[in-house]
Image (spheres, rainbow, N blue to C red):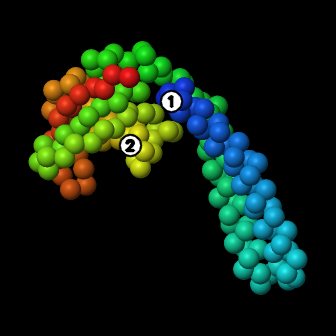
Amino acid sequence: MAKAVKITREGLEELKQKLDFLKTVKSTEIEQKLKEARGHGDLSENSEYDEAKNEQGKLAAEIAELEASIANAVIVESTNTSSSEVGIGSKIRLLDIELGEEEIIKIVGYAEANFEEGKISDESPIGMAVMGKKAGDVVEVQTPEGVVEMKIVEIIKK
């Protein structure tokens, strides 16, 4: 049985949009590259063709992964998470105690995690450390550099 993918409703919509983009726009671009590369003659020594085939393979893998995530999605409503306790869909302000730096992150399921957007998986070290905790709690997060203490400064209300 496939693993359930915990995801917010918003995250599921983003995955569906990305899948649609990959199936329509991106796959059409790659097909065009393949067509142009075939026009250059001998495929056995055609690096453009090889590159386009590799790109096509990566795209197929990404599409398959997205389809599996969508098929196994279990919607976690942000409103079901207590505003006094961290859960999937919670947006929190974290303080790295040693560095004195604060950051705002949103706890999400692994399928919609995106570090650059501040979306941290509930299965990541930080996510696991803060799940079920309250504002004011200090948690220990295991990182490659060692244990880091972080304080949940605030659970941000919508």
Position of 26 relative to 35 (above/below): above
Which disc number belongs to residue 107? none
Position of 100 relative to 30 (above/below): above
Tell whether 86 sits left or right of 52: left
Q: Nearer the viewer, residue 74 or 97?
A: 97
Residue 18 on image: x %, y %: 63, 43
Q: Amino acid at mark 2?
A: Gly
Q: Nearer the viewer, residue 156 or 86?
A: 156
Q: Quadrant of residue 26?
A: bottom right
Position of 145 relative to 82 (above/below): below
Question: Mark 2 — residue?
Answer: 118
Residue 106 visible at all: yes
Q: Residue at x 68, y 64 (%)?
A: 55
Q: Amino acid at mark 1?
A: Ile
Residue 63 on image: x %, y %: 67, 47
Q: Nearer the viewer, residue 1 or 6?
A: 6
Q: Residue at x 33, y 16 (%)?
A: 82
Which disc number belongs to residue 7? 1
Please tell me how crowded label 2 is: few (under 14), some (14-19), or many (20+) other residues with Cα within 10 Å: some
Q: State the separation of the CA atoms marked 2 and 1.
A: 15 Å
The quarter of the image holding the C terminus is: top left
Tell whether 80 sits left or right of 55: left
The quarter of the image holding the N terminus is: top right
Position of 105 relative to 42 (above/below): above
Mark 2, secondary structure of its residue: loop
Residue 34 on image: x %, y %: 80, 68
Residue 15 on image: x %, y %: 60, 38
Q: Residue at x 23, y 28 (%)?
A: 154
Please tell me how crowded label 1 is: few (under 14), some (14-19), or many (20+) other residues with Cα within 10 Å: many
Mark earlier in primary sequence (2, 1): 1
Front of the two marks 2 and 1:
2
Q: Residue at x 36, y 27 (%)?
A: 90
